[in-house]
Amino acid sequence: MTDAERQIAEARAAGKAEAETAAALRIAAAEFRGLAAGRIADPDAAIELLDLAKFVKDGEPDREAIAAAIEQLAAVPAAPPPPGQIPAGARQSTAPVSDDWLRQIRRR
C-alpha cells in the first residue's frame, strides 16, 4: 500500500467514525424524545441543554442512561402547602372590665 492509499484509507476511516458518531447522536436524541413524550413539557429544549454523547455507549444509545436522565428531569417537587388560615374565633366584648386594677388606680 502506498502512502497516498494509506492516507485515503485513514481519511475514509475517520469520516466513517464521524458519520457513525453523528448518527448515534441523532438516534440518542430520537430515543430521548420517545421516552420523554408526555413526561417532560419540552423534550427538544431539554435535548439542547444535554450532552447527548453521554447517552451513547459503544455507538448505540444507552436507554438506561436516557431513562435515568428523564426521571431526574421529570421529577416534580411537591406542591407547597396551601396558605394557612387563622380562624376568627370568638369575639370578646369591648365593654370595660370592672376589676381592671390600672383603671381603678387612675380614678384615685
Image: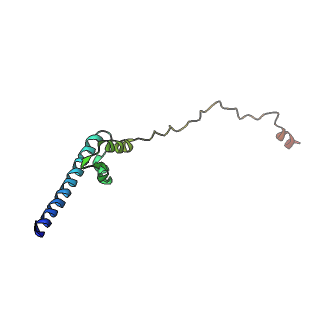
Position of residue 36 measured from the top left corner of the image (x, y, whole percent): 30, 42
Position of residue 67 measured from the top left corner of the image (x, y, whole percent): 33, 41
Q: Is residue 40 visible?
A: no
Q: Is residue 106 above or below residue 50?
A: above
* Quadrant, the N terminus: bottom left
**Outermost residue, bottom side:** 3
**Viewed as shown, does residue 57 lie left or right of 13?**
right
Position of residue 32 measured from the top left corner of the image (x, y, whole percent): 28, 45
**Outermost residue, front side:** 1
| Quarter assignment of residue 100 | top right
**Viewed as shown, does residue 85 lie left or right of 51?**
right
Position of residue 8 measured from the top left corner of the image (x, y, whole percent): 12, 65
Who's the residue at 24% across and 50% down the image? 59
Q: Considering depth in this image, is 66 or 81 the residue closer to the camera?
A: 66
Who's the residue at 66% across and 32% down the image? 91
* Quadrant, the C terminus: top right
Q: Is residue 52 visible?
A: yes
| Quarter assignment of residue 75 | top left
Q: Considering depth in this image, is 53 or 17 the residue closer to the camera?
A: 17
Colour convention of the picture: rainbow
**Viewed as shown, does residue 85 lie left or right of 7?**
right
Q: Is residue 12 above or below residue 26?
A: below
**Viewed as shown, does residue 105 lie left or right of 62?**
right
Q: Is residue 84 above or below residue 60?
A: above
